[in-house]
Amino acid sequence: MNAHLPKAYQSGFQDFYGRDFIVTPDVLIPRPETEQLIDTVLNLAGKPYLKGVKPGPNLLPKNPKILDVGTGSGCIAVTLKLEFPEADIIATDISKKALKIAQKNAKKFGISIPFIISHLLEKVNFTPDLIVANLPYVDENWDWLDKEALSFEPSEALYAENNGLALIFELIASASKLKVPYLILEADPIEHQSIITYAKNHHYILKETNGFILILHYN
């Protein structure tokens, strides 16, 4: 076994939101900053997510339809279903190999989630109440990147064109056509202002940011 292979790939598991998810080199290794996305959804739904922290008002329908775009290992979709069981969770990914891992994780935790093979929203034929997405947002030209460390993970799940913003911009434009009420996106904080500006031109305004996470509201 390659001594440089990340521990998660060596063991086949990675902790995410207190649960061990199956991971292989076909999917990204879940990262701590993505856990903020779960907190953000729960807060938007008026649900407690941290002991002693009062959640905000519920801004979602009683049984919201939440779409996880680019699900990868399924860690976001599965965690949302476990933490928010009354929500209707659907997930997409362009990678068949990734969706196989996501399906294994759903089965591991005893839940049922529809998984759709789709480039962003191309195969989505409904309007969700909320889209969550941790899409590829890394710019290969960032001079601080440790490309050697990232070389074991699927490049198509890491890197995007247009300074890392191509897929995020495409998703925002597609979601705007469907008038999706809320988008919760993960991106590097240095990209946030560009995303906010682009979103504004597509009827989305910034509700708030939380670390790597942005909440956009259709206006």
Image (tube, grey):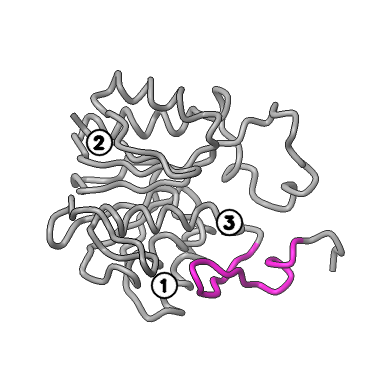
Q: What's the magenta region? A: 6-24
Instruction: Report x, y in % for residue 165.
Output: 50, 28
Mark 3–mark 1 distance (CA, rounded to whole Å): 19 Å
Residue type (three-letter) at the residue carrying disc 2: His
Badge 2: few (under 14), some or many (20 or more) residues near its Cα, within 10 Å?
many
Q: Which mark is residue 217?
A: 2
From the viewer's perspective, is residue 191 above or below residue 115? above
Which amino acid type is marked by label 3? Arg
Task: Pick whichever of labels 3 and 1 is earlier in the sequence.
Answer: 3
- Left or right position of 146 against 36: right
Per the image, is 100 magenta?
no
Tag 3 residue: 31
Q: Between label 3 and label 1, give the one nearer the viewer.
A: 3
Q: Position of residue 161 (x, y in %)?
A: 56, 27
Q: Which mark is residue 106?
A: 1
Residue contact between numbered discs 2 and 3, judged by CB atoms under 8 Å: no
* Circles 2 and 1: CB atoms closer than 8 Å: no
The location of residue 208, given as percent across then percent down, is 35, 38
Helix, strand or loop at mark 3:
loop
Q: Quadrant of the N terminus?
A: bottom right
User: Which one is nearer the viewer's eye here, 120 or 83?
Assistant: 83
- Separation of residues labelled 2 and 3 (CA atoms): 25 Å
Q: Quadrant of residue 216?
A: top left
Query: Looking at the picture, does residue 180 appear above or below residue 108?
Result: above
Identify the element where label 2 is drawn: strand
| Residue positioned 44% across, 69% down in the render | 103
